[in-house]
Image: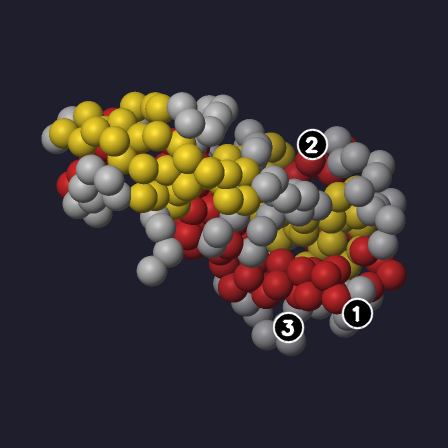
Amino acid sequence: MSNIRLFHPENITENTTSLLSKEHTHYVVNVMRLKRGSNLNFFNKDGEWLSEIIFLDRDRVEVKFLDKIKEPTNSSNIELAICLVKKSPMETILQKATELGVSKIIPIVSERTEVKDINFERANKIVVEATEQSNQLTPPQISEVTKLKDFLKNLDSSSKLLFADINSKDNLKSEVLKEAKTLSVLIGPEGDFSPSEQELILANPHAVSFTISKNVLRSDTAVISAISLVNFIHNDH
């Protein structure tokens, strides 16, 4: 059985010790019921370290960082620009997008978006837990909520905007993904973008529309389908 993995955003140095946060202490003591001498792994963008519990009490756990077992990896250049949806599907989107390896999640408000904000504390907790579970090193960055027109206006010139368009009949082609510094996958709200918003997106010089299904998909299903497709084409060519 593999060791428990926990995200440790601060710097880690081999053969040094650290007290765990209150949250991690509760998890180690009360949830996983680990003992002194137990091993677990801590990771961040700089790599992953095998660690040992050297002191354990009900409200205090100290660990020693031992060997570095994983070097840092190149971060994905795939981002998700997602129109906000209700709590449950949004949490699924955060979790699955993280598992699929996106480097950044950009919450967007459009004309038909019913939800206008996101609980950032809860969102960050979800992406950290998904990173721990999926054997990755760096949780995706979650940007501030932005309006669609502002997102399009501020899109970097080296980015390619991959628009999962319900009206498109075009398959995504591998040559579209070449030479782009960032691949930004755009998913609309429940009810889709308005006609004027679709025109605005397609008028963007960096936009490429593509189809992911002949069926109408829920936002969370569309996210999984679109990112999986981009990953498959991008990594296979």
Provide residue 66's location: percent of width, then percent of height.
41, 35
Q: Nearer the viewer, residue 107 or 216?
A: 107
On the rendered structure, is 79 left or right of 162?
left
Q: Nearer the viewer, residue 23 or 147?
A: 23
The first of marks 3 and 1 along the sequence is 1
Quarter in which the C terminus is drawn = bottom right
Which residue is at a point 47% across and 54% down the rendered structure image?
134
Labelled pair 3, 2 in contact (Cβ < 8 Å): no
Provide residue 214's location: percent of width, then percent of height.
64, 76
Q: Amino acid at mark 1?
A: Asp
- Identify residue for label 1: 170
Q: Nearer the viewer, residue 3 or 167?
A: 3
Which residue is at a point 54% across and 67% down the rendered structure image?
217
- Identify residue for label 3: 213
The first of marks 1 and 2 along the sequence is 2
**Mark on residue 89?**
none
Provide residue 43's location: percent of width, then percent of height.
47, 38
Estimate the spatial distance between the alpha carbons at disc 1 and disc 2, rounded to whole Å: 26 Å
- Identify residue for label 2: 150
Q: Is residue 173 among the parts visible in the rendering?
A: yes
Colour approach in the figure: secondary structure
Q: Amino acid at mark 2?
A: Asp
Which residue is at a point 34% across and 48% down the rendered structure image?
4
Labelled pair 1, 2 in contact (Cβ < 8 Å): no
Mark 3 secondary-structure assignment: loop
On the rendered structure, is 22 left or right of 173?
left
Residue sitting farthest toward the left: 58
